[in-house]
Amino acid sequence: MTQPEVCRLRHPRSLEDLLNYRLFRLYAASTSPVTRLMEGKWGISRREWRLLALLAAVGPSSPSALAEQAHLDRPRTSRAIASLVAKDLARRAVIAKDARRATVSLTPAGQALFDEVFPHVARLNTRLLEAIDDELVLALDRALNTLTQRADELGSITEPQVRANRRAGGSRRVRPPAGF
């Protein structure tokens, strides 16, 4: 009698078995054509597209809210917003009562670009999902929703005293003092 196959996602033994790594590989491979379209045809970066699409979906937002929704850090979000403003695709309006706060919204040109680009991105998405049948697409959708919810839960229970310090090389490492 042979041993049942152990699901490598549940019991990872190598990098290739880690869910996040596999999802990153899928993301990298599937966004490559999108990035080429964005940069080559429309002159915007993938990050600018993400913010443009979020603004089209949610309407005017603060830069901080956009950063959170786009899962980007604030400096990168700020640079992307500045680039969208320079390209007349977005407008940044300072709130009169507090010059430190602002609202970002799409310009008519930004909305028009979104309306032009979205069908192309949706077609690429559809073509990717043609690799699996409808039943598996529904199962994938449910699994992604469940995993995202679980990841959000796990993210909120991390130890508060352990925080990343990206200015010091990407992460804060716990090391013994020099000379130990």
Image (cartoon, helix red, strand yellow):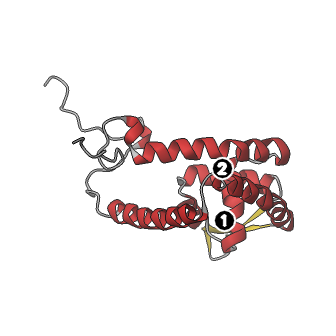
Residue 138, by quadrant, is bottom right
The numbered disc on residue 79 is 2
Q: Which residue is drawn at 82% across and 53% down?
A: 87
Residue 105 seen in the figure: yes
Query: Picture coordinates of residue 115 (x, y %)?
Result: 82, 65
Quadrant holding the C terminus: top left
Q: How far apart are marks 2 and 1 (CA)?
A: 16 Å
- Is 45 situated left or right of 137 in this image? right
Q: Residue at x 32, y 42 (%)?
A: 12
Quadrant holding the N terminus: top left
- Is 126 situated left or right of 64 in this image? right
Label 2 secondary element: helix
- Is 101 situated left or right of 127 in this image? left
Question: Residue lying furthest left in this view?
Answer: 180
Query: Picture coordinates of residue 17 (x, y %)?
Result: 38, 41
Nearest to N terminus: mark 2 or mark 1: 1
Q: Mark 1 points at which residue?
A: 54
Question: Residue lying furthest bottom in this view?
Answer: 97
Q: Which residue is drawn at 33% across and 47% down?
A: 7
Up/down of 90 relative to 79, above or below: below
What type is the residue that disc 1 sits on? Answer: Leu
What type is the residue that disc 2 sits on? Answer: Arg
Residue 95 seen in the figure: no
Query: Picture coordinates of residue 119 (x, y %)?
Result: 79, 61
